[in-house]
Amino acid sequence: MQFDAVLIDPRRAAMVAAGYWRDEILLEYLERWSTKTPNKEAIISFNSQTGKERRITYGELSHLADRIALALVDLGVARGDVVSFQLPNWWEFNALHLACLKIGAVSNPLMPFFRQRELSFMLDFAATKILVIPETFRGHHYPSMIDDIRDDLPKLEQVLVVGGLGDDAFETHMLERQREQAADALQGRAAQPDDVVQLLYTSGTTGEPKGVMHTSNTLLYNLVHFTERLGLGQDDVIHMPSPLAHQLGFMYGLMMPVMLGATVVLQDAFTAEKMAE
């Protein structure tokens, strides 16, 4: 899919001159912390479906993003292609976006509660090439849902299932297969500061959802001033219960911790019973 962020030269020049756009991408921060503090925990993730906790350091997160990026390249994902992921707040979500940045692909986060009607429109409109979903979450079986609409999505080439089985399993395809390419195969592929890196749909309350495009400059600009005003830094621990597929969760639960070199604790589900214990 071809994206045009429509960045008018005078507007861009004004944002850079004011110091709002710093022409950075999130990968620069990931490289900084994976080099300086490789053993520091970047993500603490709990999967309520399996009952398993996963703790990932900055060194491991960088390695995982490389592996996933190479797997996406093997699947034919190129610069500007859309990778959609309808995942709860699991570490795979964070690693997928970082992997997309490494190859100039566009991340399209999708809320876990979307069903056939919303997904048929969103995946088709985005010309989604790769979709990543959970096997089950909150009692819903996602592969069956996608099977219902697969015939309506001719541009969708591959569906990968976190917690799935067989060749379509995210774990098998993205993490366990041995690949001949080294990380240097990713050189020159990374997104640039004004490239569209995120396609996020509006709620669609007054019509069909609108696909809003964001670049690294537009996203990071918000975080720089937010963290400075609150005095946040590397030693902070960030709790994120808001869905990562919502802009609040995406920016402050995925991007901000990496920018700060901090640790994020991801919460994938909320139950009143648990909170009362």
Image (cartoon, rainbow, N blue to C red):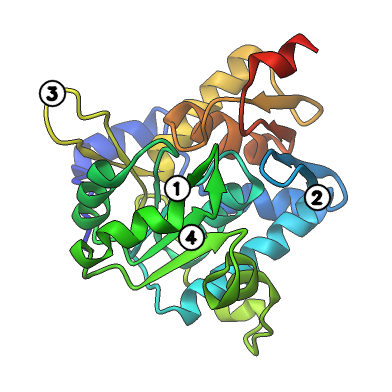
Look at the image and tell me in which quarter the N terminus lies.
bottom left
Q: CA distance from mark 4 to mark 3?
A: 31 Å
Q: Is residue 228 above or below residue 136?
A: above
Residue drawn at x 39%, y 27% as measured from the top left: 18
Q: Contact, CB < 8 Å: mark 4 with mark 2?
A: no
Q: CA distance from mark 1 to mark 3?
A: 23 Å
Q: CA distance from mark 4 to mark 2?
A: 19 Å
Of 114 and 180, the residue lying toward us? 114
Read off the residue under disc 2: 57
Nearer the observer, disc 2 or disc 1? Answer: 1
Disc marking residue 206? 3
Of 111 and 143, the residue lying toward us? 143
Residue type at numbered disc 2: Thr
N-term mark: 4 or 3: 4
Q: CA distance from mark 3 to mark 2?
A: 42 Å
Disc marking residue 86? 1
